[in-house]
């Protein structure tokens, strides 16, 4: 049997690639990345694609080009983990041994969890910015809509960067305002939270913009089903069901779930997510197993910005676990960038308790600014590909 690899990472997204780059920089010589996709995508730009401010071509790179120097890429799909033998099983039946294993496969969209959603998307009146296959269609739908009822949703947790689902709403409303048709469009927002995001220091910035665009907000609500032929959206609320009829467009973010093969590593009360200590990112019962990103039960709202802290903590903790040092801790820091119109954006930074954790003290980044929009749309993708994925940030 071949010798086990030093660190095996399952997942070729932001979490997996960034961690591989950081491990190489701190001296790990044998890092393997297991990822089946031929392309790597900068997913935050999907919301800008849906808002007509980016193209799909701007967010993809070949996977081979983003694998950090010195790492081994196995372009296959993981299907199981044997924590007793410390091996990852691939779809080919091959087994890859590890000393330390990091699980970062992300979440999978679960369209079937919302009856009628897949068919409504196939018929063309429902779409979402959260799927690569439909982000461009979302912009087409926004441009073509000139009247009628339109529904946007913030997904319930777990979901990848759920709060950023507000971006397409505001980009769409500002587009309709500029073209003089907003008054003919009945805009609805469905949120699972008691307020907009249940973050008072952010909600007070967002609510005036929702009022400015005359958006009807359905609080503590989720999409229960769509009738693809009657073009209706049924909401599940605290009071039961509420049906929105005659819907012209429904921008519904699907439910998300962890890949089925990670279920043996999930825990009670984690919603199928990998059962790690949210502070150290170490699995609670499987030695040598770690996790980060959307698939890990970290008790915070996932985001790309959150991964920067997680990567720093996890890379160092793998090293510390081998030297007997005390492990570093992650406070749940995360960040939600939200465009409030087509040229201004705010940043919400907070920890797992919802307490603000601003990285800049002299400037309030929850105030929408043109500079923040420009940074998020143009500079952040450059930082992502040139520095973050290489373990430099």
Image (cartoon, grey):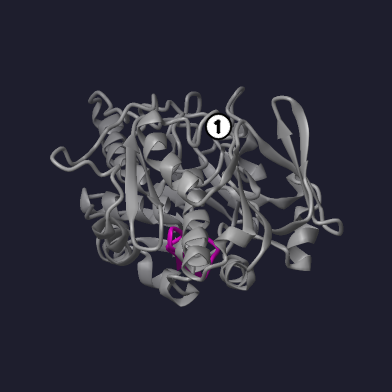
Residue 17 in magenta stretch: no
Residue ID at (49%, 66%):
175
Say left or right for 232 vs 275: right
Within 10 Å of the Cα at label 1, are there few (<14), some (14-19), or many (20+) other Cα atoms?
A: some
Q: Name the residue under label 1.
A: 193
Say left or right for 169 vs 199: right
Q: Where is residue 252 in the image (x, y as percent from the top left)?
A: 65, 52
Comparing 255 with 174, the one in front is 174
Say left or right for 326 vs 144: left
Say left or right for 392 vs 334: left
Task: Tell me the quarter of the picture where residue 353 sits.
Answer: top left
Is 277 above or below relative to 52?
above
Residue ID at (30%, 67%):
378
Is 243 above or below relative to 94?
above
Comparing 320 with 160, the one in front is 160
Residue 24 visible (yes or no): yes
Residue 161 visible (yes or no): no
Q: Is mark 1 on a helix, strand or loop?
A: loop
Task: Tell me the quarter of the picture where residue 136 sits.
Answer: bottom right
Is 17 above or below relative to 104?
below
Q: Which residue ends up furthest to the left in the rendered image?
A: 362
Residue range of the region highlighted in magenta in the rendering: 35-45
Q: Where is residue 88 in the image (x, y as percent from the top left)?
A: 55, 47
Task: Tell me the quarter of the picture where residue 76 sits.
Answer: bottom right
**Secondary structure mainly formed by the magenta segment:** loop
Q: Where is residue 335 in the image (x, y as percent from the top left)?
A: 35, 42
Comparing 122 with 283, the one in front is 122
Residue ID at (64%, 57%):
91
Q: Where is residue 230 in the image (x, y as percent from the top left)?
A: 86, 56
Q: Which residue ends up furthest to the right in the rendered image?
A: 229
Comparing 78 with 230, the one in front is 230
Residue ID at (60%, 66%):
138
């Amino acid at each position: 049997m071949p010798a086990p690899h030093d660190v095996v990472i399952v997942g070729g997204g932001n979490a997996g690639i960034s961690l591989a780059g950081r491990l190489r920089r701190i001296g790990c010589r044998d890092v393997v990345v297991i990822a089946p996709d031929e392309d790597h995508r900068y997913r935050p730009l999907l919301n800008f694609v849906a808002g007509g401010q980016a193209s799909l071509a701007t967010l993809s790179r070949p996977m081979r080009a983003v694998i950090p120097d010195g790492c081994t890429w196995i372009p296959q799909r993981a299907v199981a983990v044997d924590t007793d033998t410390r091996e990852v099983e691939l779809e080919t039946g091959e087994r890859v041994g590890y000393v330390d294993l990091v699980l970062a496969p992300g979440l999978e969209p679960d369209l079937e969890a919302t009856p009628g959603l897949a068919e409504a998307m196939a018929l063309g009146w429902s779409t979402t910015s959260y799927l690569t296959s439909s982000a461009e269609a979302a912009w087409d739908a926004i441009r073509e809509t000139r009247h009628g009822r339109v529904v946007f949703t913030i997904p319930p947790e777990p979901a990848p960067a759920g709060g950023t689902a507000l971006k397409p709403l505001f980009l769409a409303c500002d587009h309709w305002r500029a073209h003089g048709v907003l008054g003919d469009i009945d805009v609805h927002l469905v949120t699972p939270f008691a307020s907009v995001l249940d973050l008072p220091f952010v909600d007070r910035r967002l609510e005036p913009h929702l009022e400015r665009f005359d958006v009807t907000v359905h609080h503590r609500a989720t999409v229960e089903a769509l009738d693809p032929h009657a073009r209706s959206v049924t909401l599940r609320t605290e009071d039961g069901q509420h049906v929105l009829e005659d819907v012209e467009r429904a921008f519904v973010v699907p439910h998300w779930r962890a890949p089925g093969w990670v279920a043996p590593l999930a825990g009670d009360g984690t919603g199928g997510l990998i059962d790690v200590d949210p502070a150290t990112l170490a699995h609670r019962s499987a030695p040598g197993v770690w996790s980060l990103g959307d698939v890990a039960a970290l008790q915070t709202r996932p985001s790309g910005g959150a991964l920067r802290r997680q990567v720093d903590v996890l890379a160092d903790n793998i090293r510390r676990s081998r030297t007997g040092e005390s492990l570093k801790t992650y406070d749940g820091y995360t960040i939600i960038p939200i465009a409030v119109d087509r040229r201004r954006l705010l940043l919400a930074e907070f920890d797992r308790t919802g307490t603000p954790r601003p990285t800049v003290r002299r400037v309030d980044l929850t105030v929408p600014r043109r500079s923040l929009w420009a940074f998020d749309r143009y500079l952040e993708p450059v930082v992502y590909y040139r520095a973050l994925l290489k373990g430099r940030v």
